[in-house]
Image: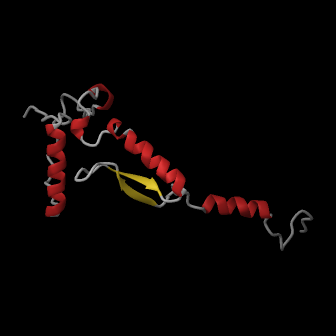
Amino acid sequence: MENDDYEENCEPSPKLLRLVEQEAREIKPHQEEVEMINLGNEGEEKKVKIGTSLTEEIRQQLYTLLKEFKDIFAWSYEDMPGLDPEIVQHRLPLKPKCHPIKQRLRRMKPEVSLKIKEEVEKQFNAGFLAVAQYPQ
């Protein structure tokens, strides 16, 4: 039984090999080296990250622009008092007849737990968080 269309030593075409290689390649987000610059005055921290691949002239222009308009950035939660809660409000979609399930307390390293507590307090004091009252 002979098949004229079949070649025993057939090689895939270069185009097919290139497509297979592209398919197997992992696509990662672009990661550029960055540096931190402080836009605040002495003793005042207002840090932003800028790319290191900028030319010195562009870098200086960007720094000047950011420094000039630093008052339009929100540097803390207190800087956002007029933020409309309807834009960013998160709610848990609970069914009225379903009771919440109590989970075990998740233990964390003390330094991580302290950072979480500080962040929650900042957001609570700024009015971003509220205590939810659930029926028993």
Looking at the picture, how far across and down is residue 113, in whole percent? 15, 57
**In the visual, does 40 lie left or right of 120?**
right
91 left or right of 102 in image: right
**Closer to the camera in the image, 63 or 117:** 63
Judged from this view, the residue extending furthest toward the bottom is 9
Looking at the image, residue 10 lies above or below residue 43: below
Q: Nearer the viewer, residue 97 or 37?
A: 37
Residue at the extreme left of the image, as rendered: 136
Note whether 130 is above or below 2 in the view shown. above
Q: Position of residue 4 (x, y in %)?
A: 92, 65
Which residue is rendered at x = 39% and y = 40% of the image?
68
Q: Is residue 24 visible?
A: yes
Is the image coloured rainbow, by chain, by secondary structure, or in one colour? secondary structure
Q: What residue do we see at 21% from left, 37% from top?
A: 78
Location of the C terminus by quadrant is: top left
> Measured from the top left, where is residue 75 in percent x and y?
28, 43
The N terminus sits in image quarter: bottom right
Camera-nearest residue between 23 and 78: 78
In the depicted view, which residue is nearer to us: 113 or 49? 49
Name the side, left or right, on which 21 lies relative to 76.
right
Q: Position of residue 134 (x, y in %)?
A: 11, 33
- The residue under the point 89% across, 62% down is 5
**Where is residue 108, by image quadrant?**
bottom left
